Amino acid sequence: MSNTRTRVLFAVVAIPGVLVLAWLGGYAWALFVAAVLTASLIEFAGMARAKGADPQTGLMVAAGLALLLVFLHERLTRDIPALVGGGIHWPLQWQAFIWIMILFMAAALLIELFRARPSPLLNLSATVLGTLYIGLFLGCAVGIREIFTVVEFHVGPVFGTADLTPAQLAQLDLWGAFTVIAVLATIWMCDTAAYFGGRAMGRHKLFPRVSPNKTWEGAIWGFVAALATMAGAKYAVVDYLALHQALAIGAIVGVLGQAGDLVESLLKRDAGVKDSSALLPGHGGVFDRFDSFIFVSPFVFLYLDFVVFA
């Protein structure tokens, strides 16, 4: 009961702060995601060390933050038109991504060559996995919020014109904020329904090798709650979505959000730890709290980019 009270009190304080940052968007939201990314990578590195690996934590964080900046490309090119000195201009978004990936891989290999630590193959594997899993996936959380600022590519299906009024620009930003908030709320409702549904009705184990307490009944409750939450969000705050699109995002969260939780449980079980850290009172680590959001973000981003705004 004491742990439950601690969890609830911390959530009451933390959740409004997260929602405010999602509402503000821009660099405020990016800085929050960067903090989550950094803490999660440090916790991931600790878990890897519990298995005998020695990942390059500093490089993981640097590369993860660089990947996050790729999703701020349009905002950065608008706010900082040219790099300092020599008239060197920003690369295109896909060029920036390729440069970061090449430099990251080269740096990881060369650093491992000169650091002379045991098990270089294991060390490099943990370094690359953490960077792509957490760094790239969480960068998409910024992409979800920023996709509404890429007016010239995405506004056509929404307004039918590239010449936007100030009111239309404000509406786009509002949709961006509400989309992130809706995804977060859907994840939380899915988790809550899965927990209580599983406790009340759970009989059939979902994945006992990874998480013995999770059940199919709980997973179904979570999936239905995710669909219902996104359907409600469609009519309340994200009316640019068609109903089937809102339900598709709900399904993504209902399936992949729970899969993300299982993936992190798999890693923790292998590392022999209960929580990724004890940083958040009653909630374990940052990686523990955002595992579903990490796993869901790239798929929601891709769905918005290639389906909703195709």
Image (cartoon, rainbow, N blue to C red):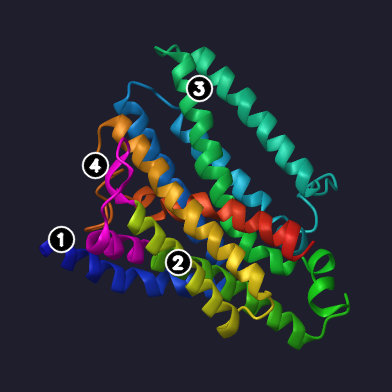
Category of crowding for the residue at label 2, using alpha-carbon neighbours closer than 10 angstroms: few (below 14), some (14–19), many (at least 20): some
Q: Is residue 35 visible?
A: no
Q: Decide: marks 3, 4 in contact (CB < 8 A)?
A: no
Category of crowding for the residue at label 3, using alpha-carbon neighbours closer than 10 angstroms: few (below 14), some (14–19), many (at least 20): many
Give the CA separation, mark 3 to mark 1: 37 Å
The answer to whether residue 205 is left or right of residue 65 is left
User: Which residue is denoted by mark 4 in the rendering?
Assistant: 274
Q: Decide: marks 3, 1 in contact (CB < 8 A)?
A: no
The stretch drawn in magenta includes residue 213: yes
Category of crowding for the residue at label 4, using alpha-carbon neighbours closer than 10 angstroms: few (below 14), some (14–19), many (at least 20): few
Query: Which quadrant is the N terminus positioned in?
Result: bottom left
Q: Amino acid at mark 2?
A: Val
Task: Pick the residue in front: 200 or 184.
Answer: 200
Q: Amino acid at mark 4?
A: Lys
> In the rendering, which numbered label is found on residue 224?
2
Give the CA separation, mark 4 to mark 2: 28 Å
Task: Pick the residue in front: 35 or 249.
Answer: 249
User: Which residue is denoted by mark 1 in the rendering?
Assistant: 3
The stretch drawn in magenta includes residue 44: no
Q: Amino acid at mark 3?
A: Leu
Q: For the magenta stretch, what is the residue range?
A: 191-215
> In the rendering, which numbered label is found on residue 124?
3
Give the CA separation, mark 1 to mark 2: 28 Å
Q: Decide: marks 1, 2 in contact (CB < 8 A)?
A: no
The answer to whether residue 28 is left or right of residue 174 is left
